[in-house]
Image (cartoon, rainbow, N blue to C red):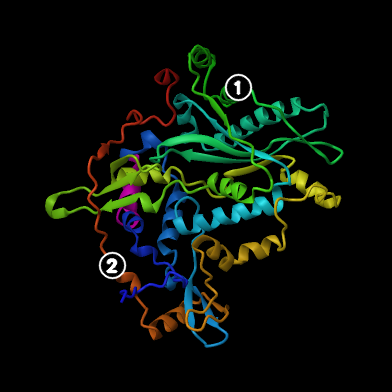
Amino acid sequence: MAQSSPYDFDIYQPRNPKASAYYKCVENHFEELEQVWDAMYKSRYGYWRTYVMTVIYKYLDCGDLHFGFARVRCEDCGHEYLLAFSCKRRHFCPSCHQKRVVEYGEWLLTNVLKDVPYKQWVFSIPKRLRIYFLYDRKLLAKLSRCAWNVITTYLKSTVPDDDAVPGASIAVQTYGDFLNHNPHLHAIVSDGCFLKNGSFQTTPVFILKDLKEAFQYEVLKMLKKEGKINDVIIENMLSWHHSGFNVYIGDRIEPDDKTGLGNLARYIIRACFSQERLVYIPAKKSDSVVAKVIYTSKDRKSRKVFNALDWLARLVTHIPNRYEHTVRYYGFFSNKSRGMRKKADADDVIPTIMPNDMSSSEAKQNWARLIQKIYEVDPLVCPKCQGQMKIISIIDDFEIIEMILKHLNLWDIRNHDPPEVEPAHIPELTYVEESDYDNSGSQIPVFDEWY
């Protein structure tokens, strides 16, 4: 007889973020990180952003019943559970970011992308220029505009209609496989242009060399205008045999491939790290062992071990600023264009990839649908009788929260330590020291240092 499992993976179980190795790593080191930032990391990553602490505190409270919850109750048998509030932080809370990824994929297919073919475009820049985008995140929006100038110039040149316009959704990613700073762009681009008469014309084969040169020109021109580089640097970089700029264009994705488009939409705004590929080894005071993070590459072929504080320092550089847009819409897909077409009742001439049966506010509030798409289990199905459950109240008053949790013997669970994480034995590790940049203390590098 098979041994029974304490978990039923067909039944939704509210998450316990405090039990994860990632949570323990953040909890153990975030205060020290803020204290030592100026001495250890400012010269590499720029000034400490106060918003980072807001994100960290919100994450540490995410999923904690002491900060409020919803009561979810079965209408048939009366079974009930409490659902803690989430923090909604991007690129730091794994659970909240994953919900955002799913939501964005749905939004793109039901509200933006039209029933036409698409291609993925990827734009990357040389290492020499990446430092400017690390110290000045406003440049990321301008980098996105550089990519759009290349896209629209090329695609419009392939059709005879002067009023033709392509459409694109461009997402900024600032991270490499091991959280190294690598600003680059992923774009979902219409494989052709929308014409003024309401039709769509596809584009011929791309010429990659011309596109790379065009992107290089746009970026260098932008950085010079922003005062980041001068003519000497531009002249030096133009003399390189390999420019370091790259434009990649994937295969055509037909509009009936909803799965492929959905996967691509989720991929371009994926989280900067994966909990599943992280192992945290806490410090041992008795042996003077420094806490470490072991991180596995996306292809699972290589691993590196970091000082835990260094790994966390890398991670927080990828947190977007408050209200910072990491996805932008251009051309036929811009907010202005979509708004004008809806106002003129002309937005359905070419239908979207998927029909939109709910309003934007309904989609955002339907947390159960998002959880079902992520975990393939419906949180509103009663585990006792399989009946329908629904949210019956939202509790955010501190006195009521305390009363309910004490009644359920759940009060003060914040003082309990999460289970100890036992790291797996992983051989052949490469220790990474944080020495990417000089330690001169300069916030903006001197031009000559980056030849």
413, above or below 280, in the image: below
Question: Where is residue 320 drawn, in percent x and y?
Answer: 51, 46
Q: CA distance from mark 1 to mark 2?
A: 53 Å
Residue labelled with disc 2: 417
- Asked whether 208 or 204 is in front, the reply is 204
As for residue 34 lying within the magenta part, the answer is yes
Residue labelled with disc 1: 221
**What residue is at 82 percent from the left and 28 percent from the top?**
162
Give the extent of the magenta segment: 26-38
Residue 36 seen in this snapshot: no
Residue 268 seen in this snapshot: yes
349, above or below 203, in the image: below
The disc labelled 1 sits on which kind of residue?
Lys
Mark 1 or mark 2, earlier in chain:
1
**What quarter of the picture does the C terminus occupy?**
top left
**Residue that lies at the very extreme toward the bottom in this rendered image:** 77
Q: Quadrant of residue 127?
A: top left
- Asked whether 13 or 199 is in front, the reply is 199
Task: Left or right? Give the position of 168 relative to 212.
Answer: right
**What quarter of the picture does the N terminus occupy?**
bottom left
Question: Where is residue 114 drawn, in percent x and y?
Answer: 73, 46
**What residue is at 59 percent from the left and 45 percent from the top?**
325
**What residue is at 57 percent from the left and 85 percent from the top?**
75
